[in-house]
Image (cartoon, grey):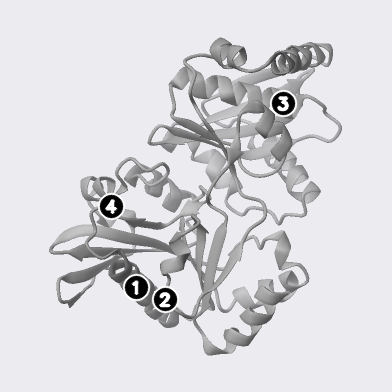
């Protein structure tokens, strides 16, 4: 489905699949931003096949200057800060789904604006106004603008509540040409830490492997669920199709084996010269497996010459020592679509 509405020099088009949008036009607006390419969104739609995608494209003087990618989601894993509201919200979302704006599977915003846009606020208002209209048509409960960078939410129209998430992702900017150079750039304590990790991994017979396809999905999912339970997270409904379709974006599955038994895993995905780690799985009581996976991920990023490596949230002190820093993607904005959710949303945001 495509549609156009015109107001002065601004018009908007609606597409219900990335396959309806020209790849060159899409990637031209993305301008090399990571996890915003046409190929990445094809992967996202394949993995999130149970969610309805809606892509809003804004044109100014017939040039694409902004977009918002929305997903109608009935089974969104609710964050830990939802607390006691989780049970109630799960039941509500089965009838009134969320309308979430995000880049699929990447913990990044689904709003992309051209740097040359004449009036960014007008483009953003057009996108949000149309999103609210579509959400009402689909009987969605709440419009969620996920993973916003700090500052972007200040230009949102009225009616939005804003929450800063306390556990942002982490990213390493790659400044070295190889792994030896990376180690040499650290201090003596960092190098000793790496050598000690290798010795302990050798004692425990930990072996790290790289795989271009997932051939042990059930075992990997079991370990991924172990980590989700440990952190009080709900199961990610897209983990299995993500592993099964990783070849669409040149993914690499890192596995850690101990005496032939899978003890850990992590999926590395890449887009526009940036790598991202996801699908972390760890067996209980397997020290040094996580560290070996992280070091192997850093080594791979350096070998591939990527610009940066994203490694999710948590373990902030350890990651800081390894060279990671917090990402600027920790703001969530949400607005009720159906009037009956306004009071509930206010209670949730204040709890």
- Looking at the image, tell me whether mark 3 or mark 1 is earlier in sequence order: 1
> Marks 4/2: CA distance?
20 Å
- Looking at the image, tell me whether mark 1 or mark 4 is earlier in sequence order: 4
Residue 255 visible in the picture: no
Residue in the foreground of this view, choosing between 196 and 138: 196
Q: Is residue 77 left or right of residue 26?
A: right
Q: In which quarter of the image is the N terminus?
A: bottom left
Residue 119 drawn above or below residue 135: above
Q: Circles 1 and 2: CB distance less than 8 Å? A: yes
Secondary structure category for the residue under label 3: helix
Residue in the foreground of this view, choosing between 302 and 219: 302
Residue 313 visible in the picture: yes
Q: Which mark is residue 115?
A: 4
Residue at 58% x, 79% y is 95
> Marks 3/2: CA distance?
44 Å
Around disc 4, counting alpha carbons within 10 Å, would you say few (fewer than 14), some (14 to 19), or many (20 or more)? few
Q: Name the residue under label 1.
A: 125
Disc number lying in front (3 or 4): 4
At which x and y percent is residue 34?
Answer: 41, 41
Secondary structure category for the residue under label 2: loop
> Marks 1/2: CA distance?
7 Å
> Marks 1/4: CA distance?
16 Å
Residue at 82% x, 28% y is 286
Q: Name the residue under label 2.
A: 157
Residue 103 drawn above or below residue 283: below
Secondary structure category for the residue under label 1: helix
Q: In this view, does 145 lie to the left or right of 323?
A: left
> Marks 3/1: CA distance?
44 Å
Q: Which mark is residue 284?
A: none
Q: Mark 3 points at which residue?
A: 291
């Amino acid at each position: 489905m495509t549609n156009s509405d015109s107001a002065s020099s601004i018009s908007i088009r609606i597409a219900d699949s990335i396959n309806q949008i020209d790849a060159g036009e899409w990637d031209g607006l993305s301008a090399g931003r990571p996890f915003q390419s046409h190929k990445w969104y094809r992967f996202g739609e394949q993995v999130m096949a149970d969610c309805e995608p809606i892509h809003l494209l804004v044109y100014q003087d017939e040039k694409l200057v902004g977009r918002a990618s929305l997903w109608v989601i009935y089974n969104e894993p609710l964050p830990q800060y939802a607390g006691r509201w989780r049970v109630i919200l799960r039941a509500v979302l089965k009838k009134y789904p969320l309308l979430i704006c995000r880049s699929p599977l990447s913990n990044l915003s689904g709003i992309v604006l051209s740097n040359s846009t004449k009036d960014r606020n007008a483009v953003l208002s057009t996108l949000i106004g149309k999103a609210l209209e579509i959400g009402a048509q689909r009987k969605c409960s709440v419009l969620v603008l996920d993973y916003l960078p700090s500052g972007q939410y200040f230009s949102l129209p009225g009616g939005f509540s804003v929450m800063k998430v306390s556990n942002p992702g982490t990213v390493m900017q790659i400044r070295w040409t190889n792994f030896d150079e990376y180690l040499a750039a650290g201090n003596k304590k960092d190098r000793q830490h790496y050598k000690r990790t290798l010795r302990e991994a050798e004692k425990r017979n930990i072996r790290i492997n790289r795989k271009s396809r997932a051939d042990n999905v059930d075992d990997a999912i079991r370990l991924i669920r172990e980590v989700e339970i440990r952190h009080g997270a709900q199961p990610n409904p897209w983990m299995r199709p993500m592993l099964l379709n990783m070849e669409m974006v040149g993914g690499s599955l890192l596995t850690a084996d101990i005496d032939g038994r899978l003890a850990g895993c992590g999926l590395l995905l890449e887009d526009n010269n940036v790598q991202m780690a996801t699908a972390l799985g760890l067996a209980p009581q397997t020290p040094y497996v996580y560290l070996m996976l992280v070091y192997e991920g850093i080594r791979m990023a350096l070998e591939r010459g990527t610009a940066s490596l994203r490694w999710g949230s948590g373990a902030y002190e350890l990651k800081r020592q390894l060279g990671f820093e917090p990402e600027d993607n920790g703001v969530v904005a949400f607005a009720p679509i159906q009037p009956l959710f306004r009071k509930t949303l206010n209670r949730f945001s204040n709890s």
